[in-house]
Image (cartoon, rainbow, N blue to C red):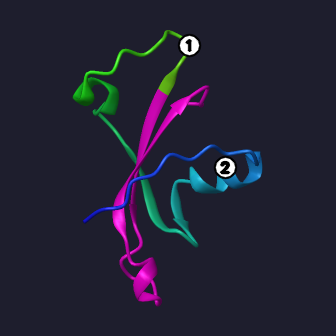
Amino acid sequence: MFPSEVCVYSDERYFQEMVQIGQSRHGATRRIEGRSLANEWGLVMPATIREFGLAYDNSMASNLEDRRVGEYWFFGEVQG
């Protein structure tokens, strides 16, 4: 099983925390380079929509439920 979700961020500060590269309270995060989820899924994107992906690794979290490894993909008017 894997989690999947759609998030709408209404707080710019929280969004910026989520897209932070490096180590944070959410684990280690790095930019995904050389891939496009839109291309992989055959999505047609309007010219004004951008995407970027982050890989995260929180496998060392002390709480078992927080131990996750995966990807976040952002679509919208995002800085890429």
Q: Earlier in the sequence, mark 1 or mark 2?
A: 2
Residue 57, quarter of the rendered image: bottom left
Question: Residue placed at 76% from the left, 48% from the top?
Answer: 11
Q: Which residue is mark 2?
A: 16
* Secondary structure of the residue carrying numbered label 1: loop
In reply to whether residue 76 is colored magenta, the answer given is: yes
Work out which residue is located at the far bottom of the displayed protein and give it: 62
Res 66 → quadrant: bottom left
**Image height of 3 relative to 31, above or below:** below
Please say if 74 is above or below 13: above
Q: Residue at x 46, y 90 (%)?
A: 62
Front residue of 7/71: it is: 7
The magenta stretch spans which residues? Answer: 51-80
- Residue that lies at the very extreme toward the top in this rendered image: 47
Position of residue 62 in the picture relative to residue 1 (left or right): right
User: Which class describes the residues within 10 Å of circle 1: few (<14), some (14-19), or many (20+)?
Assistant: few
Please give the name of the residue rendered at 56% of the width and 50% of the height, measured from the top-left corner: 19
Q: Is residue 50 left or right of residue 58?
A: right
Pinpoint residue 17: horizontal percent, then vertical percent.
65, 56
Q: Is residue 45 above or below residue 5?
A: above
